[in-house]
Amino acid sequence: MPQTKTVSSPKSEHSSPLEAEGVQVIQDNLDYTLFSWSKQKGISPIAVQRGEGVYLYDYDGKRYIDFSSGLMNVNIGHGDQRVTDAVVKQMREVSYVTPSCVTKVRGELGKKLADICPGDLNRAFFTLCGATSIENAIKLARHYTGRHKILTRYQSYHGSSYGTISASGDPRRLPVDAQQAPNFVHFDLPYLYRWEFGEESLLTESVTQLERIIAYEGPGNIAAIMFEGESGSSGCLKYPVGYLKKVREICNKHGILLIMDEVMSGFGRTGKWFGFQHHDIVPDMIAMAKGLTCGYLPFGCLMVSEKIASKYDDNVMPLGLTYSAHPVSCAAALATLSIYEKDGLIENAAAMGQYITEQVEGLKKKHKCIGDFRNTGLLGCIELVKNRKTKEPMAPFNAKPDEMTVMNKVAARIKDLGMYTFVRWSYIFIAPPLIVTKEQIDEGLAIISEALAIADEHVE
Ligand SMILES: Cc1ncc(COP(=O)(O)O)c(C=O)c1O
């Protein structure tokens, strides 16, 4: 029998049938389902009854402003019926074909993505999510180059499947350390806020360190270096200006492929189609998911250069998935991409990102707990500190539950005040859907400001 009975109120105590239903929804979920990255007891999830625009609504009719676009994926906002209509239309025609058959939507989507992507990144292998895009990127890079090592940053997350959690430098891999897949090498790339010697020295040191690691590992053994297009869940840690350009040169010199993981930073979130486009480079592969369908259906894509694809003109490409190029997901993606363009969402992300930067400057004056704010477009986070001089974080890197007391109180206040957002260690994420308006940003920042008052009390 289920052990977690934490919602105790009987149905009759609730004023409306909908509220009673909400209690039951939570109870069933707690009793019969498992929650990602969590202790299973003591969870208090929002039971979402519906979503519209930047808002989610629970069964009590309470409204939450979604300030992290779900998990930084619902870029077009919730409940856009244009995607629903495209999905229904496709399902009425055909819901599934094997990946060896073709559909109109698959070809059209491939063509559209080739249009959006720079350089000769023209060939799409469709996947199911971020992890399956990255898994296939790793596999293809190794097969194409005949080399085995993949280098990634410690401050990165690339997914939670066997290969992708091993590729991730993120501490989420540590509890499963003994299961790590071989031939992933991580390197450190510090960020400016916690680097005392200035940006120029950060660039020089970071490039030199990477070159040293490549020499130690043997350039001829390295298939690829993989980066997030712009850093996401590690705290939006920006690349030193010019860094990715240097990395591109190093890759060219040694015949190493450059893979950009645009799962979180892609599709307009940073104010450009892809995060790497802020750095004037063209990678060899792009891994995509999240904003490709904005969570309306699970989907992903690995975009590869003509150069890589052409190897497989006369050789078997050893990749495959039952649900590759799923027609209904392709239809959802096509509808989503047209919404970005028709509604000018990428331009809005750039403009609203600028507005948030200006407004957070004001919050910094009011709240001593704000140590730093970093964003590119609508991919941003506030980093809280106990002391602006020492920069001691409000919660340490990879904080244990008992080190999260203050941050948990801040997060609980945010939720109470009617906001859903991603809070991790000492970071509060500000990554609303790309449809967000100035008024909605003001509403969200007012909630964050009220919650920050709790953290201010813990500033030394
Ligand atoms: C940069 C990045 N890559 C890959 C992934 C994995 O995507 P998924 O959870 O769809 O497997 C994530 C998920 O948050 C991500 O942020």
Image: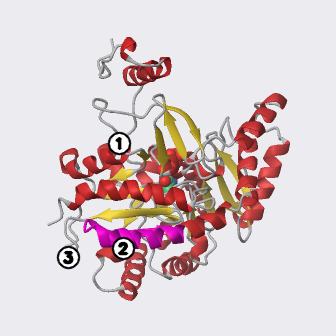
User: Mark 3 against mark 2, which lies toward the viewer?
Assistant: 3
Kindly identify which numbered label has been placed on residue 262: none
The amino acid sitting under disc 2 is Tyr
Q: Main secondary structure of the magenta part?
A: helix
Q: Which amino acid lies under the numbered mark 3 shown in the image of this protein? A: Lys
Label 1 residue SS: helix
CA neighbours of label 1 inside 10 A, class few (<14), some (14 to 19), many (20+): some
Location of the N terminus (image quadrant): top left
Q: Is residue 368 magenta?
A: yes
Marked residue nearer the N-terminal end (1 or 3)? 3
- Highlighted range, magenta: 353-375
Mark 3–mark 2 Cα distance, whole angstroms, equals 17 Å
Disc 2 on helix, strand or loop?
A: loop
Camera sees residue 156? yes
Circle 3 SS class:
loop
Closer to viewer: mark 1 or mark 2: 1
Q: Is residue 321 left or right of residue 188?
A: right
Q: Relative to 227, say whether 197 is above or below.
A: below
Residue 289 appears in view: no
**First in sequence: mark 3 or mark 2?**
2
Q: How is the image coloured?
A: secondary structure
Corner quadrant of residue 24: top left
Residue 407 at what x, y percent from top left?
26, 52
For label 3, the residue is 389
Find out whether residue 133 is within the magenta segment: no
For mark 1, what is the residue?
Answer: 416
The three-letter code of the residue at mark 1 reads Asp
On whether ligand 1 comes within 8 Å of the CB at mark 2, the answer is no
Q: Is residue 318 left or right of residue 253?
A: right
Crowd class of label 2 (few under 14; some 14 to 19; many from 20; radius 10 Å): some
Q: Which residue is mark 2?
A: 191
Task: Give the farthest residue toward the left.
Answer: 460
